[in-house]
Amino acid sequence: MIDLIGLFLNNLLPIFLAAGAGYLLARWLPVETRTLSNIVFYIFSPCLVFSLLINSQLSNSDLVGMLLFALLSFALVGILAWAIGRGLKFERKMLAAVVTSSMFMNAGNYGLPVTKFAFGDNALAYASLFFVANSIMINTGGVVISSMGSATFSTAIKNLFKIPTLYGLVLAALVINFGWKLPLPLERATQLLGDAAIPTMMVLLGVQFHSMHLGGKILPLSVASVMRLLVSPLIALGLCAAFGLSDAFRQAAVLESAMPTAVFATILATQYDNEPSFVSSVVAITTLLSMLTLPPLLAFLGS
């Protein structure tokens, strides 16, 4: 029990304290959430992914392996959530909201700092790949699911090419593959911007929570929360065992899979009028419950 408390204090509490600072800032000052989010999304995040990858020892097979692992994990969680929702006879919009809430996790402004604090930069490099895969899926599959099929395939493809972290991944892969050396000013600028990503993400998390409203139905809320916090990491553990994955890869993949529902899921639900109040509730509740579910998982992964 003492070990679990220590894991919470050392790995999770710093994130909630930083998010609390963002929450208080949004309460006292007119913080523009979209502007802060755009800075993180378009500048800090791609620089973080790029810097982590070019300074890591990851190979091209590591890059492809993590992306495929993440996509398979998302698919299995989504299919299971859909099957459960259909079995419980959720109406169409609620079913789509449960699936998106179950599939997509807060891999960025929550998952990355937890991974860094718990397992260091090597695991963080793997986690950044998971973060890229999550961004790709939520901007393509998430759009299609949230729109209840009204989004066209071309819209999904266009959204894919709007993800800046994807370009950070591609550029990093080119640098690693060809052994290029960045000019020192460019390397340092990229490193500085990447270093700003995680603290800004934590503050942004608190700012986003200030504008969130609770509300939702108990049964679908329970299904989405259990899928996101318990079933998803169990699926990730099963995939790691099936493919013989271990060490930093396993730590990053399973830990990211256990993160609460992505705040961006609320944005999609609002955009497509797809139970936004319910999705906001799942985001808030899974984030709070993660304080209970993550410490035992951290202890298990670190053993």
Image (tube, helix red, strand yellow):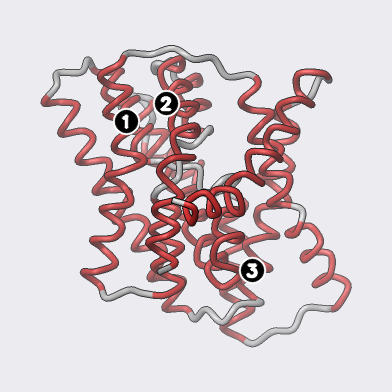
> What's the distance in space between the residues labelled 2 and 1, CA to CA?
7 Å
Query: Disc 3, disc 2: CB below 8 Å?
Result: no
Q: Three-letter amino acid code at disc 3?
A: Leu
Asked which quadrant contains residue 255, the reply is bottom left
Query: Disc 2, disc 1: CB below 8 Å?
Result: yes
Asked which quadrant contains residue 68, the reply is bottom left
**Residue 250 in picture, x, y percent from top left:** 39, 67
Label 3: element kind:
helix
Label 1: element kind:
helix
Residue sitting at x 65%, y 66%? 50
181 vs 120, left or right, is right
**Residue 3 in picture, x, y percent from top left:** 48, 56
Q: Three-letter amino acid code at disc 2?
A: Val
Q: Is residue 70 above or below residue 126?
A: above
Q: Is residue 94 above or below residue 235?
A: above
The residue indicated by pointer 2 is: 282
* Sequence-earlier tag: 3 or 2: 3
Q: Which mark is residue 116?
A: none
Residue 162 shows in this picture = no
Q: Which is more foreground, mark 3 or mark 1?
A: 1
> What's the distance in space between the residues labelled 3 and 1, CA to CA?
32 Å
Q: Residue furthest bottom?
A: 179
Asked which quadrant contains residue 302, the reply is bottom left
Badge 1: how crowded within 10 Å, few (<14), some, or many (20+)?
many
Q: Which mark is residue 52?
A: 3
Residue 153 shows in this picture = yes
The residue indicated by pointer 1 is: 224
Q: Is residue 31 above or below residue 230?
A: above
